[in-house]
Image (cartoon, rainbow, N blue to C red):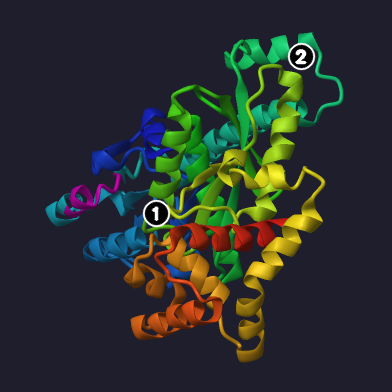
Amino acid sequence: MVTCRDILNLKLDGVELVSGEAGLDRMVSWTYLVQTKPYDEHMNRGNYALLVVDYERYKPEDILAVMEELNDLGISGLAVSIVEDREELSPEVITRAEELSLPLFYVRWKGASFVDIDQSVGKLIMEDSLQNKREGDFLYNLLFGYDISDKYIEKISSQFGIEFTEPYRVGIIIVDRKYGINHEQDEHTYEYYGNVLSREVTGMEGRPMFMRFLNKFVLLFEARKDKQIEHELEKILRRIDSSDSFKGKISGTCILGAPYTDPRDFGQSYQQAKSLIPKIDMLPNPKKKKVLSASAMGIYKYMFNAGNQREILDYCNKNLEKLEEYDHANGTFLVDTLLAYYMNGFNTANTAKELYVHRNSLQYRLNKIQELLDFELDDYIKYLDLVNCILVKRLMFL
């Protein structure tokens, strides 16, 4: 991805970095000429802002306030040009940019024009997009091509430095989005999320192949025994999702297919990961992991291939019958409570928080469960059997 560092490396005539060097790796999604307010109607995260101090719309003393507001909107960098270089940037502006780690560039009036900057940055972004598309096309053909020949595999190996002597697996990153009132801004935020994700994933050790496909993100990487890439991917997704840019708005989870050595089988790895997507909310995941695989289903994955689904379902229905009938008749959520209490390690505070109920209400539900099923909550064998029944039913009907 293009960053402010790439803009600095262009060495455009009259363009110099005066502050905020620590933020040079901020990604640049496009350029934007600051002219009118309110900025949030025009600016998007990752924009490289261009500001002209013309002494009519903007004066030197306005720069600090403009910079603060634009930084809050998530700009990547700010380039300032002052008509006829009549004044220098104030020490306050330079100091504040350093504190914000916001790359602040000064553009000499007779140096590069904003048109030059815009065109140069646009060219970098287009070249980067073409490279990403090229890699995506290779990966798409590898996963969905009908004829993956040795020659094609050799071509990918030489192009991307991949040696298919070790097992590889496919990961599908699905994104949960919350929409606000500004649909266009939501789409820009999602696009920026994709750019951040692409930069982070392609910067991982082992350099996974990566592409955007429909509303998902797909990667192919070596399945090492130490699972280093899976662990790194878990950290990346947690870091991105908890950042100020995306927290509460966008959240990603990666579903993994099985590893294969023969590239002709990578498409099968993709299909395995895809088949788990509808089950993601039902998979046993008490630690809220961001990277899940078929192994997360544990013993459940074997139950649906044994030919005795009717017998299993009858057993589960019988175990849960009293709770389900009570929930249906009273509009309660005893089944959900039973599962949530287990998934939260029998911690009442965490369970109540997840279910959005008071701890007294939770205790009432737990007492009712014990009463209806005539068992004690510390009977962990029986409790686990009930949890298994809930999960089997939910997974079976997806």
Labelled disc at residue 213:
none
* Amino acid bearing label 1: Ile
* Amino acid bearing label 2: Tyr
Examine the rendered structure and indicate whether residue 160 appears above or below residue 19: above
Q: Residue at x 37, y 32 (%)?
A: 13
- Label 1 neighbour load within 10 Å: few <14, some 14-19, many 20+: many
Magenta part of the protein: which range? 96-104
Expressed as whole percent of the image width and height from the top left, the position of residue 150 reads 78, 9
Tell which circle, 2 or 1, labels the residue nearer the N-terminal end: 1
In the image: residue 340, left or right of residue 348: right
Examine the rendered structure and indicate whether residue 326 appears above or below residue 212: below
The one of 321 and 343 positioned closer to us in this rendering = 321
The one of 25 and 357 positioned closer to us in this rendering = 357
Q: Which residue is mark 2?
A: 152
Hey, which residue is sitting farthest right in the picture?
A: 146
Q: Secondary structure at mark 2?
A: helix
The one of 372 and 136 positioned closer to us in this rendering = 372
The one of 126 and 272 positioned closer to us in this rendering = 272
Q: Which residue is mark 1?
A: 75
Expressed as whole percent of the image width and height from the top left, the position of residue 275 reads 72, 46
Expressed as whole percent of the image width and height from the top left, the position of residue 67 reads 30, 59
Q: Residue at x 32, y 72 (%)?
A: 349
Expressed as whole percent of the image width and height from the top left, the position of residue 312 reads 73, 56
Hey, which residue is sitting farthest left in the picture?
A: 91
- The quarter of the picture where residue 311 lies is bottom right
Image quadrant in which the C terminus is located: bottom right
- The quarter of the picture where residue 350 lies is bottom left
- Do residues under tags 2 and 1 come within 8 Å of each other at their CB atoms? no
Q: Is residue 102 magenta?
A: yes
CA–CA distance in space, label 2 to label 1 = 41 Å
